[in-house]
Amino acid sequence: LSAILRVVDPVVHDGAEVGHIGGQRDDNGILAGNPLDRGERGDLSVLLLLFVSAVDAVRIRTVSQPDYADNIFGVVSRMVEEEGLLSLFSTVPVWFVKEIPFNIMKFLVFDTSTDYMYEAFPAAREDILLSLLVSLVGGTLGGIAATIVSNPADVVLSELKKSKTDMTPFEAADRIRERGGIPAFATGMQLRMIFYSLLVSLQFFLYDTIRIGLGVGNDDMKLYLDVLNVALNEKVKQ
């Protein structure tokens, strides 16, 4: 489920860029901020993070203790009964520590690498297959880079949720360091690199495939959000 939810990331990223453009000053010199961009998307991101945090807590417990319960519903029920409902969301702060650098690095490397490839191979801008190949390569590089910067937080998450515990994230990090030193925070990085490189490349590939298939360009998205931005600002003024 958490992997599926990540597919919306490119849409949010593109919306953020276009929303920023839509926030330029109008003819009267007034900065037209986008309330939709600032509010609703932020609320949605928080809700998704809460949901993904709970799903991942259940996943880790299921993998680390296969006999914990008969099915996923049993795992949720037992965790809530023994540890309380909030235990499903106790790792949200660690998720922020993981997701912020993950997404920053993912988009930074994707944007930088695809810009470089388009400059090196200008024909790719006009060729659909080459353009999709650029997205695949850029997504793969972005996924690998994102894994490297977020893996330590992933290891802490696993330590916190593999069994019932009252440890804080800092105590979990200390235990990991005492057990294996700094290299212990790279545990599982190779598998995560494979998983996230495939996932992120698929994200951007599917996003660009659908966008190109529908004939939607960046200028079209900018025009739509500019019109929406004006309408929302007029409504706010009223």
Image (tube, grey):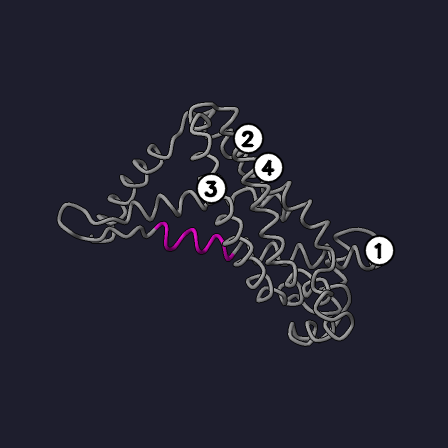
Residue at left offset 48%, top offset 39%: 114
Can you identify the residue that label 3 sits on? 11
- Residues shaded magenta: 36-46
| Disc on the earlier residue, 2 or 1 | 1
- The residue shown at (70%, 60%) is 186
Q: Amino acid at mark 2?
A: Leu
Residue for point 56% across, 55% down: 102
Prevailing secondary structure class for the magenta stretch in the rendered image: helix
Report helix, strand or loop for mark 1: loop
Q: Nearer the viewer, mark 1 or mark 4?
A: 4
Disc 1 crowd, CA 10 A, few/some/many (<14, 14-19, 20+): few
**What is the distance, in whole Å, between disc 4 and disc 2 at their CAs?**
11 Å
Q: Nearer the viewer, mark 4 or mark 3?
A: 4
**Type of amino acid under label 4:** Leu
Residue assigned mark 2? 133
For badge 3, the amino acid type reads Val
Residue 115 sits in which quadrant?
Answer: top left
Local packing at callout 2 (Cα closer than 10 Å; few below 14, some 14-19, many 20+) is some
Q: Secondary structure at mark 3?
A: helix
Q: Residues within 10 Å of mark 3 (few under 14, many from 20)?
A: few
Disc number lying in front (4 or 2): 2
Q: Is residue 98 above or below residue 116?
A: below
In percent of width and height, residue 24 lies at 25, 48
Q: Nearer the viewer, residue 229 or 206?
A: 206
Distance (Cα) linking label 2 and label 1: 40 Å
| Measured Cα–Cα span from mark 4 to mark 3 | 13 Å
Q: Which residue is mark 4?
A: 202
* Badge 4 density bin: few <14, some 14–19, many ≥20, Cα 10 Å: some
From mark 2 to mark 3, how far is it between C-alphas?
A: 19 Å
- Is 237 located above or below residue 87 in the figure? above
